[in-house]
Amino acid sequence: MKQFIVMLLAIGAIMFLYSCQQDSALPTAASQNDRDLSPLLKVEEPFGSNGTEFKGICTKTTDPDFEELDGISKELPNGKTLVMGRTTVWHDATDDPRVTGNTYWYIDQKFEEDGTFKYKGKADLVVDNDGGRWQMSWHGYLNADGLIAEAVGQGKEGAVKGLVAKWTYTFDFSNFRYDIVGYIND
């Protein structure tokens, strides 16, 4: 009986060790350094006939009560650079007062060796005149076509509570601002 138990343990150990070996024919899991910064939510189409379109611009501003941070940079083994924890504040001025106010951005970026990058994060848009607050998830990228960020948000407070909106921010390098197009689900 002892020999049988020892043999079972030996077979179990061999199976365990064999299953832990990396098989080069199988894809390996991405390391934390190579994590995908692709979006969870995408702005692809408006809300259809139930959506109200808005347009505007987003310009850099300051808020003495908000600490802007450069984030922490980390050089990755694959030659890329990861920057985590950046914060900044911009002002969205649109033709719809429900999406006009200061936007507080929380940013993570991954820079490629060629200078392009992907970025993602969260943002809070505090609507002017105590109109409420939007909570947004967003992603973006810089490539040959430009600097673009897409966001989806939900109204969390005030007059916008319960609403859902989508934003597309396209950076205008000549005027150092973002052009905004979006939709609110009314």
Image (cartoon, helix red, strand yellow):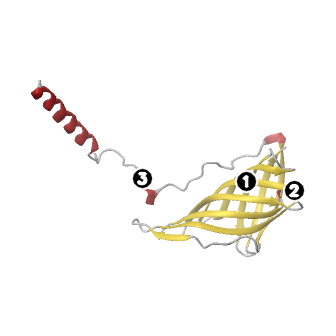
Q: Secondary structure at mark 3?
A: loop
Classify mark 1: residues with Cα within 10 Å, few (<14), some (14-19) or many (20+). Answer: many
Mark 1–mark 2 Cα distance, whole angstroms, equals 13 Å
User: Label 1, on which residue?
Assistant: 135
Residue 96 visible in the shown view:
no
Task: Tell me the element at label 1.
Answer: strand
Q: Amino acid at mark 3?
A: Ala
Left or right of 42, for residue 49: right
- Where is residue 174 drawn, in percent x and y? 73, 76
First reached walking from the N terminus: tag 3 or tag 1: 3
Q: Quadrant of the N terminus?
A: top left
For residue 2, which quarter of the picture? Answer: top left
Is the C-beta separation of discs 1 and 2 under 8 Å?
no
Q: Position of residue 89 (x, y in %)?
A: 73, 68
Q: Which residue corresponds to mark 2?
A: 131
| Type of the residue with mark 1 | Gln
Quadrant where the image shows the C terminus: top right
* In this picture, residue 98 sits left or right of residue 44: right
Residue at coordinates 72% horizontally, 57% vertically from top-left? Answer: 168
Q: Which residue is mark 3?
A: 30
Residue 133: x percent and y percent? 79, 55
Q: Residue at x 69, y 50 (%)?
A: 43
Of the pair 18 and 46, the residue shown nearer to us: 18
Discs 3/1, front: 1
